[in-house]
Image: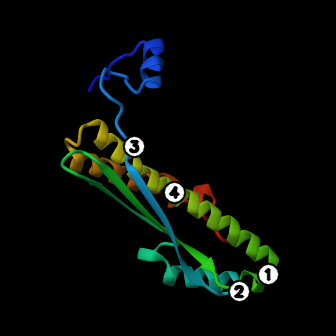
Amino acid sequence: MKLPVFNVGLLAIGLMFGIADGSPAQAKPKVTETIKTYAVSATSLKGLLSEMDKKGPKGHWGYTDWYVKWTGDCKLSVTVDITVPKHKNPAKMPADLRQKFDAMVAALTAHERQHGRHGIEAAEEIERAGCAGGDGIIKKYNAKDIKFDKTTDHGRTEGVVLN
């Protein structure tokens, strides 16, 4: 599909007034993001790894589910549910392990938020399409999630490591 070329000056004016192609600006999809946690309590590296492997959602340390819904009049909403570990008593961990754990959880949360961003992008694309072809767009962004995990080795290249 060939995208239209806009005159940058006209596009900027159109965006200021909410019109880029002569039509009213569409509302952004309603986004609800929830971060859920599962408890870990081990105070050793081996114990944390074991606990996260056992308790983590769907066999991962963290996980994101996103759902895009739309109505007959093309109002969209996105629900993003992110699950990451949370230590019950981080003060009991040795300081160096706590620092590593905190860094890993921060990297994991950022990684999972990118998965959530894919759901938001899917909703925005469905909205731009006037809600036509939504199922195909959802499949496209599901594939993007799979590729993202392969490219980042499920976030390991982004710091989702604990060693």
Check contact, mark 2 vs mark 1: CB within 8 A. Answer: yes
Residue, disc 1? 94
Q: Earlier in the sequence, mark 3 or mark 2?
A: 3
In this view, the mark in front (1 or 4): 4
| Number of residues whose C-alpha sits closer than 10 Å to that of mark 3, classed few (under 14), some (14–19) or many (20 or more) | few
Q: Amino acid at mark 2?
A: Thr
Query: Disc 1 versus disc 4: distance between alpha carbons?
Result: 28 Å
Residue, disc 4? 113
| Number of residues whose C-alpha sits closer than 10 Å to that of mark 4, classed few (under 14), some (14–19) or many (20 or more) | some
Query: Disc 2 versus disc 4: distance between alpha carbons?
Result: 27 Å
Residue, disc 3? 28
Q: Earlier in the sequence, mark 1 or mark 4?
A: 1
Residue 30: % across, % down: 39, 52
Q: Earlier in the sequence, mark 2 or mark 1?
A: 2
Q: Earlier in the sequence, mark 1 or mark 3?
A: 3
Callout 1 secondary element: loop
Q: Residue at x 42, y 54 (%)?
A: 31
Query: Disc 3 versus disc 2: distance between alpha carbons?
Result: 44 Å
Query: Is residue 137 depicted above or below 146 in this figure?
Result: above
